Image (cartoon, grey):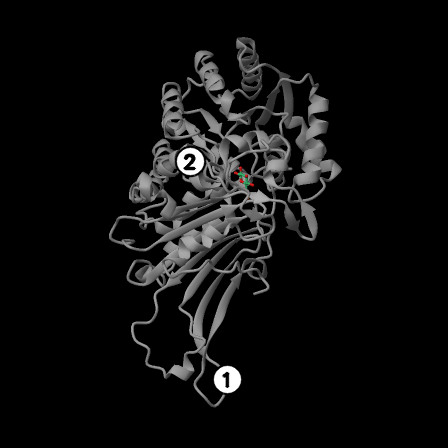
Amino acid sequence: MKSTAKTGPTIIIILGATGDLAWRKLIPAFYNLYLDKWIPHEFAIIGIGRSKLSDKEFQNHLHEGVDKNSRSGKSKKSDWDNFSPYLTYQKGHFNADSTYSDIEKRIKILEKKWKVTATKIFYLAVPPNSFEEIALKLGSSGLAKNKLQSRIVIEKPFGHDLDSAKHLNDLLHGIFDECQIYRIDHYLGKETVQNILAFRFANALFEPTWNRNYIDSVQITVSEQLGVENRGNYYETAGALRDMIQNHLLQLFCLIAMEPPVSFEADEVRNRKVDVLNAIRKIRPEEVHQNAVRGQYGAGWIQGKRVKGYRQEPDVSKTSTKETFAAVKLFIDNWRWQGVPFYLRTGKRMNETISVITIQFRPVPHQSFPAEATGNWQPNRLVLNLQPHMGIRMRFQAKRPGLKMILYPVDMQFNYNESYHTGTPEAYETLLLDIMEGDSTLFMRADQVEAAWKALMPIIDSWETNPSVNFPNYEAGMQGPEDSEALIAKDGHSWVIMPTERN
Ligand code: BG6
């Protein structure tokens, strides 16, 4: 297949290549980039893992992953036969110098064959406790010394709190320049998430109303029907606040609240996001209970099936006090957003799997219609539906047909699937291509990660010092704990019923 890619010769080194991430996400994404002709001619993926595997065994394992997980479905034999030679494997321990000298040998062989210096991308698809060790070895082996042509990719969680994130940033900065470091938050690669930027900054219509004068409040909900699956070990150290709010939800929050960037240069966009994080009003320890609510699911029903409670999941303590639901109220102390509450919530084993942002506008300043016309009156609301049904809905009042003036809320709707019939790339395809092209706009910079931790530390500290005594406090399949309603009801708001394509 002829490539039309703009990227130069590239070698991807995946450390942890026999793990779930490579199998489910990375290789299917590279495979689709290959099908869509984004892969350069001179390209190779070197998988590193602790198991003993031949290249063929490694390829067969990934073939199964592609057939099960690729958005393009089961691979065609000819396509797989053309793609699979890019994949080679090398057994190695992450703490052994020999692993890195072996990687270097392989790189040299490829570069000699291609007669160029390739871009090397070291992808750490490993648990966070291996990040430091691998980064240090990449430094001491000299593999990262070409600052222009070597990059490191780090998955979340980036740190466990503010101090550990700072420590990791300092360590990485001792080896790499910031422009070589790609911290992944896969939400930023999602089509609809990127569309928030297009919606806000490619239309003149919304920006004049995008502020405290017109907007009453903002809600960001990311709810999942899934439980913790087989990730109990990790989740017991994380919880919903660290797993979702510190990264994915705060990124969405930044995209909604940021000032218009002057350009789409990586640092300009990231500067505008950091401004938002730095302007989050500090929550004092004694205010945490008024601004944050946590929950943990007990047994219940999901799609007609009985499911276990969190404490009964594998690798979870029977007395765990880890939250599987978190809701927080944040304020942004700047001119645009002063006084506008942002409500963020996320939870596992909720009634629906949906990610949605709701912008609630203020009421009209004066009601000129008679009382009988406005019985069903509701303020304007803009709903950005990120997944699973991508779309944007605007609610406004209209006159109901009839002889009397009766107002009724109606929706104007834009639906991705109706408007576009081309396949939507997976978040990892977008992000991997950006890394190959050296574009870091959609990746988190060191100061961004630290500012996000800093905003949440009072809640994290308070929850750790005062473990919840009423867990489990919501049934699987419900909308989270009752307290989360109270969090927002005391401001005269209510969580927007999650809009599916049905309502
Ligand atoms: C991950 C979290 O970062 O995001 C998971 O660790 C969560 O707990 C997942 O399930 C959600 O991602 P998505 O793309 O399915 O919304």
The image position of residue 214, as x and y in percent, is: 32, 63
Q: Relative to residue 433, is residue 173 depicted above or below?
A: above
Q: Please, which residue is most extreme toward the bottom here?
A: 403
| Kind of residue at badge 1 | Pro
Judge by depth and name the residue closer to the eye, 105 or 472. 472
For disc 2, the neighbor class at 10 Å (few under 14, some 14 to 19, many from 20) is few
Label 1 C-beta lies within 8 Å of the nearest ligand 1 atom: no
Q: Nearer the viewer, residue 37 or 179?
A: 179
Query: Which dot, 1 or 2, sits closer to the camera?
Result: 2
Q: Nearer the viewer, residue 50 or 293?
A: 293
Residue drawn where x is 64% and y is 32% of the image: 314
Q: Residue furthest right?
A: 77
Q: Which residue is mark 2?
A: 466
Q: Earlier in the sequence, mark 1 or mark 2?
A: 1
**Height in image: 354 above or below 70?**
below
Q: Is mark 2 within 8 Å of ligand 1?
A: no
